[in-house]
Image: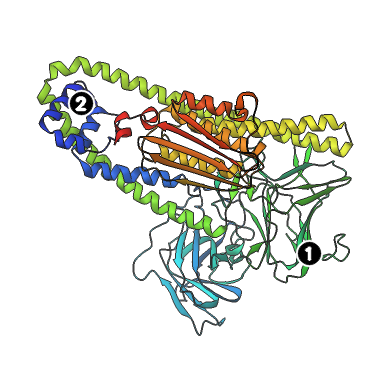
Amino acid sequence: MKSQHMRLPGLCVALTLLSLLFPDVLTAAPAARSANPIGRVARLFNRKLVVVEDRILWLQNRLDYLAAFDVKPLKEQVGWRCGKLDESGPAPWVSLDLGTEVPLSEIFLIPAQRQAGDSSDLFPRRFTVEAACCADFSDSRLIYTSGSRSQPSPDGYPIRINGDGFGARHVRLTIDDGHHRGMKEVSALAEIFVFSERQPVSLGAMVTAGDSVDIPGMWEPRYLVDGRTPLGLWEGGIWTLSRGDCLEVPEVNQQVEWQIDLQKESSIDRVILFPYALPELSGPGVVPPRLKIELSDCPDFSNATCIATQGAKELPVDLTTPVVFPISHPGNGRYLRILSEKAWQLGTRHLQALGEIEIWSNNVNLAAGIPVTVRNGELDHPIQELTDGFGGSKQIIPIHSWVTQLVERSQVQVEMDRLKDVGSKMAAESELNTAWGAAIALGLTFLIPVAIVERRRLISRTQLDKLRKRIASDLHDDIGSNLGSISLIARSAKRDLERLKGPDEIATDLGEMELIARESSLAMRDIVWLLERRQDTIGDLVQRMRDSAGRLLREIDYSLVCRSSKTTAKLTLDSKRHLFLFYKEALHNIVKHSQATTVTIRFYDARDRLVMEVADNGVGLPKVDGDQLAAVKKLSDRARVLDGTLHVESSPGEGTTLRLSVKRASLMANKKASHE
């Protein structure tokens, strides 16, 4: 690289000379993907390199929207481990009884975490998957086989096997070739997920196995269907402050009940509890150590039936996975409650906490959006955050979507790594050839002094980028954590005041403190995004607008459509900031004042202008003296800063339409791209 930096100087003269020699090539070449001037010139003549780099950029953007791959090793209930105890005997196997015959859609194998001293994760090298309706597999059919080719280690990612869509009750996995660890065919798995029409049918299934190497509490066949994997919670999607319910209880009365009215009598298939993530701790989440789940057809639970419990052993308080309670003998009832008699202790504090509650019946989460009543002594209040679809500060996604996204992430990562190697070799070769051509054309004696200046400029720019990233990281980690702690403290203090029947004014102030902390945290995340240099295109702005609309317009039907053909064009930092703040101000006005039920957001081109249109069917804007629309003064100021025009259409009772029109030349970082 040093030799190339010595050839950087004379880029302006080199470009002029090249434009005279090859004008058609320069005008037809796409925008450069490199900050290095030599790299820009090299890419003008190498379209294959530009295509490869465009694909890498697309793959990187795709990774941002997939579930994160974050290995969090389990301390217990790790999975199933097997080995060939008798070398002349049959191959190790494990069989799942799904309880009823269902169409097989997909099967996912989750590798076990790597153990100390192991060079690999012990995922089987070759295996066979069969399905059958009879328990003895007399009618078995082949679903998948590795054949004679060894399966490479998936490096912790799930392996997807497509089903045949036909009915089956039993699924069997046979290890054809494993590893050698003191015995032959040693293999290990953390979980087997079987799906029928995108719904999990293997959770809590009956498991039998041959040649298991069992360690109680660590390795047993039944741990293959308990929903616990080293890949953590089933999370993805947007970030949120909603973490669930955390209640501080006195030491003498720790019992807490979470009650849910399911609205109708139902038969429960499974209950899934997600751990509560404390903002004070950066590690795993927590759940009460002892739980009991009851179902009743009376609101006072006078005839309650216990449908699930964790058994004699207490649940671990530090969890990185959901807790799944399969209901093997479901009863019918309308009211469900979760009882906890023992709190989790943090120092001298006793906390009863849950992150999210899901109650499944016939592939439907009956608890979604239904308030949960929390009871502890005299405390009796409803809470929405236990059934809002968020836990651990992120959105909980369906388990099928979660494992599918992890499989796609592994495929995207493999392709991106391969293209990076190809792209780096192509870039190095192209830049080297370009550098030598520039050096011969201009002469080393002329290039040396300019190279020094250019190198200093690049170093300065790199330092500014590092400072920008450090500021964004500090905002996210330090201020975000503090705001989350303030919100938790305010919420806990408010509940203590309500329980002790303290002054209403203080409880109101604490509620406002919690609200301000939430809004400040969300505003801080928007500021962090505005500082991101890699997300400066119109397409990135539209995606951020979509995320903000999902957060701000949760109770309003909305649509966001982008018809612009310039989504890859980069915006300046100022224009990106003012466009996004204009959009947020418009949405805030709708939520606070409009009483609208429908909002339409459009992004489109109008000749040389970019137009943002926000329309609602609300009550319209209030008017003041001079027929000036008072509610849009801030929006008018934003439009003026952007050198744009704001057109407002509003009548009482007929809704409001805001139309911001700005010349693309005023927005784009690359002025030439704005005219193409």
User: From the viewer's perspective, is the residue at label 2 or at label 1 nearer?
Assistant: 1
210, above or below 57, in the image: below
Between residue 88 and residue 581, name the one nearer to us: 581
**Residue 429: % across, % down:** 19, 38
User: Residue 583, which numbered label?
Assistant: none
Q: Earlier in the sequence, mark 2 or mark 1?
A: 2
| Quadrant location of the C terminus in the rendered image | top left
Q: Residue at x 51, y 53 (%)?
A: 113
Q: Residue at x 49, y 67 (%)?
A: 106
Q: Amino acid at mark 1?
A: Arg
212, above or below 459, in the image: below
Numbered label tally:
2
Between residue 24 and residue 66, name the one nearer to us: 24
Q: Amino acid at mark 2?
A: Ser
| Quadrant location of the N terminus in the rendered image | top left
**Residue 236: % across, % down:** 54, 48
Q: Is residue 186 left or right of residue 480?
A: left
Between residue 647 and residue 166, name the one nearer to us: 647
**Residue 359: quadrant of the picture:** bottom right
Please, which residue is most extreme toward the top here?
Answer: 449
**Residue 220: quadrant of the picture:** bottom right
Mark 1: give few (<14), some (14-19) or many (20+) Cα within 10 Å.
some
Residue 215 visible in image: yes
Q: Is residue 158 left or right of residue 199?
A: left
Circle 1: element type:
strand
User: Residue 3, which numbered label?
Assistant: 2
Between residue 439 and residue 665, name the one nearer to us: 665
Q: Circle 1 sits on which residue? A: 334
- Distance (Cα) linking label 2 and label 1: 75 Å
